[in-house]
Image (cartoon, coloured by chain):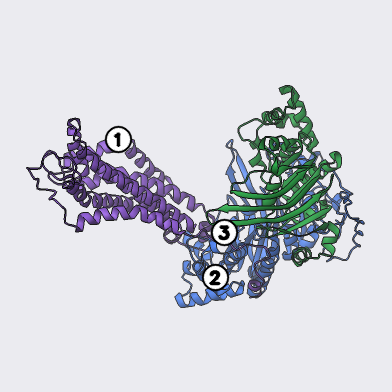
């Protein structure tokens, strides 16, 4: 499904160059739910944005290959990349309100997405698709939500709406960058349930970036550990938690053991 | 002890401040040097010709090797007068802006506190700013006389309200900052709070605004002088030189008005550059 | 008896409330009739999610916010009657550590000046003595003395928080409010900071109010815990009981929402129903009613009172008895009741099945 080969991301700024991601290589199989963990400064956000071919505010130089369903995202022309966004690859960010347009009613935002990808014939059709998407993420009154605006929603609801928008076109892969960091614990649980539900129902492959090992332990089957731009270890969750090989992994996971005690 | 040797967690990056780059200081120099040169030349160097005693034989001469900027209808050497004006205009502008700052900053700080007094104060400032301040300044100087004090007052009138507003808004931001709350929780007295916590975090913006205010002050002075107010001939000022030159442009004597205009342009641009450099430098500390 | 309580109780909140004007002008209670006590040297955890009013309550206890109803007592005397000068002097006794370390430090002040602030503000000692105490505080929190002349922007997050802690303890207060002290720090540093706080408490005899939504740190640090929901106190008692034998569905939901980093550990999740859109207005009944799976008609009619459900353990739920099946044992293995379920066998590439036993 997704294969990343020797991805390098270098930030170029007035102060010089900074290689934030170095030779990142990993692959994801269909239907997997994989966690990418690292602390601040590990480069995980930069890596994710490069993989999803999303622009960053910092000027960056990206080398390597990102093969999604056989096609290298990094070598495609922007038009095709735009086409892939939403239909094959979905992205959910940390701040749901940053992803929702504050001045447009939500049904219009859905309509725009569907129209941009030519998946809708009319406003009524968009409405129906949007309602189905919202129901799919567990929103009980989709019609009421659609008529409203982003600021009517609580954090958890907004994130559900963002997930619904990202998956409205049924992409086979979803990348989530710290999707629950900004949310309260009880809401966090609900959102993670929504994501794992997506995986169960639709077979969506999920790549979740997080710094929270609890998320990884409870929901992911595999995990990649990043430090200073490199993947220091990867493997299935059980092994990494029980017998971490790399000293950094050991340190990271050991802290978890202790703080839970 | 062990905490430090173990490092602050693996992967935690020690935050490095965006240090003042040499380029920021270079930018500052770029603004300061021309002005300093202009002023110091006027102050120290002997001028080729007297700026106050005309040479009746050399009337309305175009720029040449003898008269770099040419001469005007009275026989004054334009170059000497442009340089000499700097001696008058620059200190006046800087002085006026400084006075505006001295008044505006405390008022702005006071206006940033909560309560009806601060609100009333801002309404007074609103009222002042509702007037066409340049006109008022003009009226004041025209009525009161060409005394330097009156010109200073005029500058202050135009420039102070901006200071007050700026300081107030920045102080409001700072007052709501967590570290101010922390200081209050530490038992900090209001006086010390303003002095140690609010003011230093406002000063960066204030200094940048000071540079801008000087630029504005130059323009105010030039405008007043252009209208014939606040200047007693034969004292050279840029504004009055432009006024003289404007009268003879249609006779083809472009140099009389151009060079003082360029001087004003140079000075205003330089102060803007200084303001920007100051802003960049102080932003680096935050 | 009253003499003893004066000695042992540092802070008491008596039915305190804080009102704000809502968007449509009606009164919104950020804190609604909360009463609690903190004894000398103990740590009380205050748990709640955003909007619970826990930070507001913390500020009220420090006297940074006025109470609209009720009163706060410090060492037996009310804060309300004090003059501004008295209040200010009292601040030496009660300090606070904020959530975001960088924002709570004046970016234009050097570290040593920041730490010295309480000493300067209260004129507690002269300059040489100040320098000594600042150096002492820095050593206590594990900051190298070389950092004294640096500015906050030059320090890492963990170091900044240590500065905040040093500032809080330099004047030897009796009571420190910790407002989410580790929330914005990396995981590896959290443990260090928590250990530091515990050690300081032992060395200096401090009383803590730990405001957080992180169950793990409450479990680690707090002797007693309080749970707040939308401004009201819904449960209080010894931490162990509150977390494992919760008397209120909200507490149970919070505890079971804790994601424990142990793969294969099947946790029983107590889930709340999905929330309706928008913030529902505060009804006279229990704030949890719209999303509570145990809710009955009476729950929306009246706010349940805090009732004693065990010794020292109180909860504000009518149906607390239905909750009294113990939650799964503490993942750290502290309690000895019952074994953990054996981890599910994981083959390479196989998926972990979703947690079972979930009550939706």
Under circle 1, the secondary element is loop
Residue C193 lies in quadrant: bottom right
Indicate the position of residue B210 as horizontal and vertical percent values.
35, 51
**Subunit that carries the residue with mark 2:** C
Q: Is residue A74 left or right of residue B88?
A: right
**Subunit that carries the residue with mark 1:** B
Distance (Cα) linking label 3 and label 2:
15 Å
Q: Residue at x 67, y 38 (%)?
A: A77
Of circles 3 and 2, the one toward us is 2
Say which chain is green: A
The residue under label 3 is C102
Under circle 3, the secondary element is helix
* Number of the label disc, if any, that sits on residue B132: 1
Earlier in the chain: of badge 3 and badge 2, it is: 3
Q: Residue furthest front?
A: B65
The residue under label 2 is C147
Q: Is residue C332 left or right of residue B47?
A: right
Q: Residue at x 68, y 68 (%)?
A: C192
Q: Camera-side residue: A59 or A123? A: A59
Say which chain is blue: C
Say which chain is purple: B
Q: Camera-side residue: A75 or C316? A: A75
Q: Is residue B107 visible?
A: no
How many numbered circles are shown? Answer: 3
| Mark 3, other Cα within 10 Å: few <14 / some 14–19 / many ≥20 | many
Q: Residue at x 47, y 69 (%)?
A: C120
Compared to C119, does A3 lie above or below? above
**Does mark 1 fall on the same chain as mark 2?**
no
Pointer 3 and pointer 2: residues touching (CB < 8 Å)? no
């Amino acid at each position: 499904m997704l294969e990343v080969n020797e991805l390098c991301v270098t930030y170029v700024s007035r102060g010089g160059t900074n290689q934030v991601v170095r030779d990142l290589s990993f692959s994801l199989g269909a239907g997997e739910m994989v966690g990418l963990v690292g602390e601040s400064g590990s480069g995980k956000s930069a890596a994710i944005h490069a993989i999803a071919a999303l622009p960053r505010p910092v000027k960056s130089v990206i080398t390597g290959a990102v093969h999604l369903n056989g096609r290298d995202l990094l070598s495609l022309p922007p038009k095709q990349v735009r086409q892939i966004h939403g239909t094959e690859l979905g992205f959910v960010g940390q701040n749901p309100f940053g992803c929702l347009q504050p001045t447009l009613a939500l049904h219009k935002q859905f309509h725009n997405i569907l129209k941009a990808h030519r998946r809708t014939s009319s406003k009524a059709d968009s409405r129906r698709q949007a309602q189905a998407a919202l129901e799919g993420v567990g929103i009980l009154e989709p019609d009421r939500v659609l008529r409203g605006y982003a600021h009517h929603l609580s954090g958890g609801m907004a994130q559900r709406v963002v997930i619904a928008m990202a998956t409205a076109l049924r992409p086979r892969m979803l990348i989530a960058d710290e999707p629950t960091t900004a949310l309260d614990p009880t809401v966090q649980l609900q959102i993670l349930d929504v994501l794992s539900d997506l995986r169960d129902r639709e077979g969506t492959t999920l790549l979740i970036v997080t710094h929270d090992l609890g998320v990884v332990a409870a929901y992911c089957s595999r995990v990649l550990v990043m430090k200073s731009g490199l993947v220091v270890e990867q493997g299935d969750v059980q092994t990494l938690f029980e017998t971490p090989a790399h000293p950094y992994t050991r340190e990271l996971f050991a802290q978890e053991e202790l703080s839970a005690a | 002890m062990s905490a430090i040797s173990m490092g602050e967690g693996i992967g935690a990056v020690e935050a490095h401040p965006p240090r003042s780059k040499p380029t920021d200081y270079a930018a500052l120099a770029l603004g300061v040097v021309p002005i300093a040169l202009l002023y110091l030349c006027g102050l120290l160097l002997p001028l080729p010709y007297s700026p106050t005693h005309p040479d009746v034989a050399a009337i309305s001469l175009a720029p040449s090797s003898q008269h770099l900027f040419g001469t005007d209808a009275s026989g004054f050497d334009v170059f000497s007068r442009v340089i000499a004006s700097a001696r008058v205009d620059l200190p006046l502008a800087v002085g006026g802006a400084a006075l505006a700052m001295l008044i505006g900053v405390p008022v702005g700080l006071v206006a940033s506190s909560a309560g009806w007094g601060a609100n009333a104060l801002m309404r007074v400032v609103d009222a002042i700013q509702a007037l066409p301040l340049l006109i008022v300044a003009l009226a004041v100087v025209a009525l009161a006389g060409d005394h330097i004090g009156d010109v200073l007052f005029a500058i202050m009138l135009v420039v102070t309200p901006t200071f007050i507003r700026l300081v107030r808004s920045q102080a409001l931001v700072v007052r709501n900052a967590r570290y101010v709350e922390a200081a209050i929780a530490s038992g900090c007295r209001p006086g010390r709070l303003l002095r140690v916590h609010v003011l230093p975090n406002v000063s960066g913006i204030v200094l940048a605004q000071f540079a801008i205010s000087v630029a504005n002050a130059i323009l105010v002075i030039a405008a007043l002088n252009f209208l014939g107010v606040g200047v007693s001939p034969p004292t050279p000022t840029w504004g009055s030189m432009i006024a003289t030159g404007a009268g003879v442009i249609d006779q083809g004597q472009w140099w009389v008005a151009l060079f003082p205009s360029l001087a004003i342009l140079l000075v205003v641009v330089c102060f803007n550059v200084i303001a920007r450099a100051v802003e960049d430098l102080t932003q680096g500390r935050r | 008896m009253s003499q003893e309580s004066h000695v042992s109780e540092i802070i008491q909140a008596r039915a305190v409330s804080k009102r704000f004007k809502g968007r449509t002008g009606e009164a919104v209670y950020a804190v609604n009739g909360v009463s609690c006590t903190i004894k000398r040297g103990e740590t009380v955890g205050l748990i709640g999610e955003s909007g619970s009013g826990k930070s507001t309550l913390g500020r009220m206890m420090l006297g940074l916010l006025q109470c609209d109803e009720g009163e706060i007592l410090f060492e037996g005397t009310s804060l309300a009657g004090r003059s501004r000068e008295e209040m200010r002097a009292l601040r030496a006794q009660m300090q606070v550590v904020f959530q975001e370390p960088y924002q709570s430090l004046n970016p234009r002040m050097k570290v040593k000046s920041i730490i010295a602030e309480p000493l300067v503000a209260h004129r507690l000692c002269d300059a040489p003595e100040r320098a000594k105490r600042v150096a002492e505080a820095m050593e206590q929190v594990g900051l190298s003395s070389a950092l004294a002349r640096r500015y906050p922007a030059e320090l890492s997050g963990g170091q900044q928080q240590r500065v905040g802690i040093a500032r809080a303890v330099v004047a030897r207060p009796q009571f420190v409010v910790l407002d989410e002290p580790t929330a914005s720090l990396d995981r590896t540093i959290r443990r260090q900071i928590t250990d530091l706080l515990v050690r300081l408490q032992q060395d200096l005899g401090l009383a803590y109010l730990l405001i957080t939504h992180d169950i793990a740190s409450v479990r680690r640090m707090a002797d007693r815990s309080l749970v707040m929901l939308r401004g009201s106190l819904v449960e209080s008692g010894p931490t162990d009981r509150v977390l494992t034998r919760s008397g209120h569905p909200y507490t149970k939901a919070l505890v079971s929402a804790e994601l424990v980093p142990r793969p294969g550990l099947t946790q029983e999740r107590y889930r709340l129903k999905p929330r309706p859109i928008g913030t529902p207005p505060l009804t006279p009944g229990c704030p949890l009613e719209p999303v509570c799976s145990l809710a009955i008609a009476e729950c929306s009619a009246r706010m349940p009172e805090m009732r004693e459900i065990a010794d020292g353990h109180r909860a504000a739920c009518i149906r607390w008895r239905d909750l009294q099946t113990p939650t799964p044992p503490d993942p750290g293995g502290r309690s000895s009741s019952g074994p953990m379920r054996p981890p599910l066998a994981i083959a390479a590439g196989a998926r972990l099945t979703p947690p079972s036993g979930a009550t939706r």
